[in-house]
Image (cartoon, helix red, strand yellow):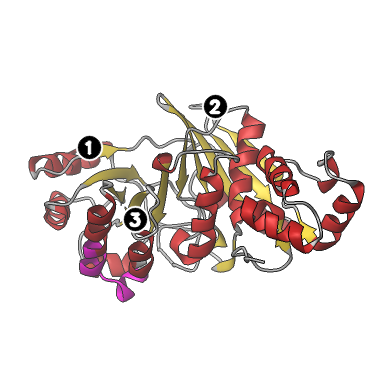
Amino acid sequence: MTQCPCDGPVELRSLLPEQLAELMLQMGEPAYRAKQIFSWCAKGVTSIDDMNNLPKDLRERLKQNCLLTAPVILRRQQSKKDGTIKYLFGLHDGNAVESVLMHYEHGTSLCISSQVGCRMGCSFCASTIGGLVRNLSAGELLDQVIFASRDSGKRIDSLVLMGIGEPLDNYDNVVHFFRLLNHEQGVRLGLRHVSISTCGLVPGIDRLSKEGLPVTLSISLHAPNNALRSAMMPVNYRYPIEQLMAAARRYAAATGRKIYIEYTMISGKNDSPAQAKELAGLLQGMLCHVNLIPLNPVAGKQDVSSQRAAIERFSGVLKRCGVTSTVRRRLGDDIDAACGQLRRSNMEEQRS
């Protein structure tokens, strides 16, 4: 059987129809059963027993040999300010990840996690505290979309892989998830409405540019030079800014897609007019747009967000240098909005 990129037992929600067809062949079942199972998985069925158009014998064999992932909502926090919903999803092995549902004028956007924990070590991020536990499977990525939509009653119009984890550190599962997400018999979310954020894994960027998937690449840059970025983001020691910007330009050239530069505004650290000018110099001639992001406070971290006036000055310098930017609204700041905080607080409660 063509293997899905997941560890352990066969996860039904991680399989494409052709992979399910091979599984059915191995189990002595007709190929059309694959479409039935795939349809059930896309609808968010939580038990193999609920696949009531399958023979009971097949359902029993599937329960013995396969896993149907179905997250449990451990916590659900909704902002009183803007309606943002933050989910803490419990996974089948006792781990947990976060997803955030955000409402915009153009529709509903979901930010999902790609790993349990993270090993990138960025100094301002809550997700990396405690390191990497494991990768999420393609099915567990899809689960976040299906079950956030089901709970909220909202169709997901756009998707961002910017939650816990580094997506390109879980490359095979993430790309497989894109194919599941976009499949005409499944959720059918167009990949032009999907963004993937990376802290700068250059080989993954180059590999993704050759996949033929029209996803938008967002680069978490956060500093305009190597000295500052290395202090904030250890990945920069391995892939310094010059290599990262070259990879971004290659991605834009190969895909025709605009690159989004994510730049978290931290008071007194990376928000001066001189640093804005330095950033503009890095981006000259690139098909790109800068998102300026006020820092969400993280318990145990000393960094604080830049003041609004400093952010506006920074944006003004970029504009005068010919670089477009947007100051992102800080959504859900009354509900542990920074990635990883809800999971972290849950872990601390379990230890106490």
Badge 2 density bin: few <14, some 14–19, many ≥20, Cα 10 Å: few
Residue at 10% over, 43% down: 322
Check disc 1 and give the amino acid type: Ala
Tag count? 3
Per the rendering, the mark at residue 220 is 3
Give the secondary structure at mark 3.
Answer: strand
Q: Considering the image in quadrants, where does the C terminus appear?
A: bottom right
Q: Which residue is mark 2?
A: 80
The magenta stretch spans residue 249 = no
Badge 3 density bin: few <14, some 14–19, many ≥20, Cα 10 Å: some
Relative height, residue 262 to residue 227 (above, below)? above
Residue at 14% over, 39% down: 316
Check disc 2 and give the amino acid type: Lys
Quarter where residue 238 is shown: bottom left
Give how far apart the Cα atoms at labels 2 and 1 are: 26 Å
The magenta span reads 235-246
Image coordinates of residue 70 in percent, x first then y, are: 72, 48
Of labels 3 and 1, the one closer to you: 3
Left or right, 130 with respect to 1, comes to left
User: Which badge, 2 or 3, comes first in the chain's sequence?
Assistant: 2
Give the secondary structure at mark 1.
Answer: helix
Of labels 2 and 1, the one closer to you: 2
Q: Nearer the viewer, residue 224 or 297?
A: 224
Residue at 34% over, 46% down: 305
Give how far apart the Cα atoms at labels 3 and 1 are: 22 Å
Name of the residue lying farthest toward the top = 105
Left or right, 116 with respect to 204, comes to right
User: Which badge, 3 or 1, comes first in the chain's sequence?
Assistant: 3
Image coordinates of residue 345 in percent, x first then y, are: 62, 53
- Let me know if residue 352 appears in the view: no
Q: Which residue is mark 1?
A: 309
